[in-house]
Amino acid sequence: MKKFFQKILLAFCLILVFIILLSGIFIIRQIKSAVLSNQINELTELASALTVEIQPYERMDDSQLEKILTTQARISKTRVSLIDVSGKVVFDTEKEAGELESHRYRPEINRALSGEVTWTARYSDTLRKKMLYVAVPIRKGGQITGVCRVSRFLDLAVESYQKARNRLLICLALFMILGGGLSYLFLRKLFRPLQDIALLTEKVASGEQGMAVGPLLRENLGELASAINQLISRNQEVNELLRENKELLQTIIDSTEEGWLLVDEAGRIILANKSLRQMFPEIGEGSEFYWQSLRCPEINEILQKAHSSERPVEGQLEKDGRIYSCQANWLPLNRRFLLRFADITEIRELARKKKEFVSNLAHELKTPLTAIQGFLETMEEENLSEDGKKYLKIIQRNTERLVNLVEDLSRIAELEEKGTELKKEAVNLQEIIQSVIKIYSRRAEEKGLYLKLEAETVPEIFADPYQMEQLILNLVDNAVRYTEKGGITVKLESKDRGVLLSVSDTGIGIPEEHLPRIFERFYVVDKSRSRKTGGTGLGLSIVKHIVLAHRGKIEVKSSPGFGTTFIVWLPASFENSQ
Ligand code: ADP
């Protein structure tokens, strides 16, 4: 505002100076010409009067006449010269006439000899100064007998003009100062309300409350002032709303159990919620970048993956003996990462204990169950009553279920315990399928089903052979169990740098609503049928576990009453850490 004011003031002053200078030049010129013509008139009158005085004298070089002329010249501060028609100077008040050259061709003499009353301002060769000359012809009996020339130093002639000019210049300078001062006062008065508004808006911008344009300003600025007042109150409303929303957001963010961390591309911390600061107290100690206090290379890896894939990426990290899950989301619009941390140490411990328990339980149950099975077989040879035989069968069937369950449980425990550590080697899937078919061919035959393999020549894949066998065993076992007529076809073909294995049957099928859940542990579609066929609800979850551990994919297509197909794709080779 100050600069703007200075600019306007400068412009005002420049305009003022320009106008005053222009009018000054005009006035000075006017004065100059007025003073000059005044001088010419005066000299003309003097010269004309002298020609009249000359009249009574016979000769122009009369000493009496010379006296008169000298006196007149001294009084009027002029030089008087008498020139005859030949141009010869007869008399001069300043010089000896005889010393002077012919004046015939002096412009004023020349014109006066032709009868004109004339004037000229020129440099005098005689006196070596600029002079104003007025020449009047001297007449006698109608004849021009000579010229009376009256001259005065030009600076003397314009002395009054110079005085007037100087006075005028002083006046103009005073006008300028006065004008400048008045402009300053006027502009200051004009700017005062604007300055007040600038001050007011500054205060509003810095968040000061209860501000408004005062009555004085309202008087001066009318509509503008009320518009500003409206703007201020709207601004206050918006600020209030923003503050409320911010507080609400902060409360929500702080109340989540997850630790939230928002960082920019360079890792600069934008936001860290309460839970995060509790998880990692170092973060709250004014670190600018997360890596200054969270020295975990895993986070950097997760961030890079999230950035390049533009998808949420999850990982784990260990810090000070605790395990954290970390999910990173790349927000491309804001060019920021949102990291969500959860302390999963207890969950991990619980899962480990559960696994340990299941594996121990399975192990402990195996020995008594084998003993029971053995004794049941021995009892078969005993002479039992019909009822006894019936009960023995029931006990045998249930023991078998129990054995299956224990086996599946220990298999799951085994798989989970191994985690991602697979014993990978080149595996010929065709051979494994053939050995599984051999195991199940008798059961299929008993049920009157066909069991065949349709295989292209596929390359060997890099996988865990034991797990591959478990996978195929489970799928073929289910297919045989849930099919009563028709049969089972196992197909093998190459696809997308891997192999596609499918097990299709013409069995009872699975209703659509069950399809999303059949891979869950202990999920059975029909409990009584499962019980009858010795199912445990664990087979497909083992299959899924194996497929995922090998970075493969599994899908199921089924139509109740017509059959089911499980399709498994396995990559030819993969890295565990991928
Ligand atoms: P289960 O040991 O009970 O068979 P699974 O996990 O192997 O458990 O299978 C889950 C459920 O999926 C089964 O209860 C069964 O109803 C259904 N199912 C699996 N395979 C087939 C199949 N080939 N045909 C029809 N239903 C099947």
Image: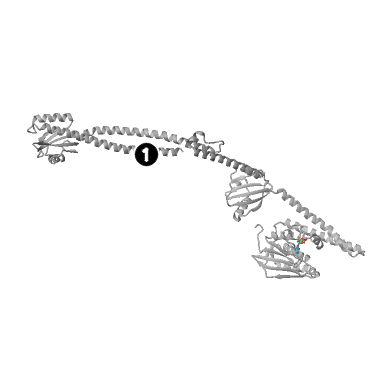
322 above or below 133?
below
In the image, residue 266 sits, relative to residue 70, either above or below, namely: below
Q: Is residue 70 visible from the viewing direction of this image? A: yes
Q: Quadrant of residue 416?
A: bottom right
- At horizontal 65% and vertical 61% (from top left) the residue drawn is 574
What's the image's color scheme? one colour
Q: Position of residue 297 (x, y in %)?
A: 62, 50
**Residue 395 location in percent, x, y?**
86, 60
Q: Please state the horizontal and vertical placement of residue 114, each as a whole percent of the image.
A: 13, 41
- Of the pair 257 and 507, the residue shown nearer to us: 507
Q: Is mark 1 within 8 Å of ligand 1?
A: no
Residue 418 in the figure: left or right of residue 262: right
* Disc 1 element: helix
Query: Within the displayed image, which quadrant is ligand 1 positioned in?
Result: bottom right
Q: Is residue 338 above or below residue 542?
A: above
| Snapshot quadrant of residue 5 | top left
Q: Amino acid at mark 1?
A: Ile
Q: Is residue 360 above or below residue 387?
A: above
Front residue of this view, candidates 558 and 200: 200
Q: Is residue 128 visible?
A: no
Q: Picture coordinates of residue 534 (x, y %)?
A: 81, 62
* Residue bearing mark 1: 15
10 Å crowding of disc 1: few (<14), some (14-19), many (20+)? few
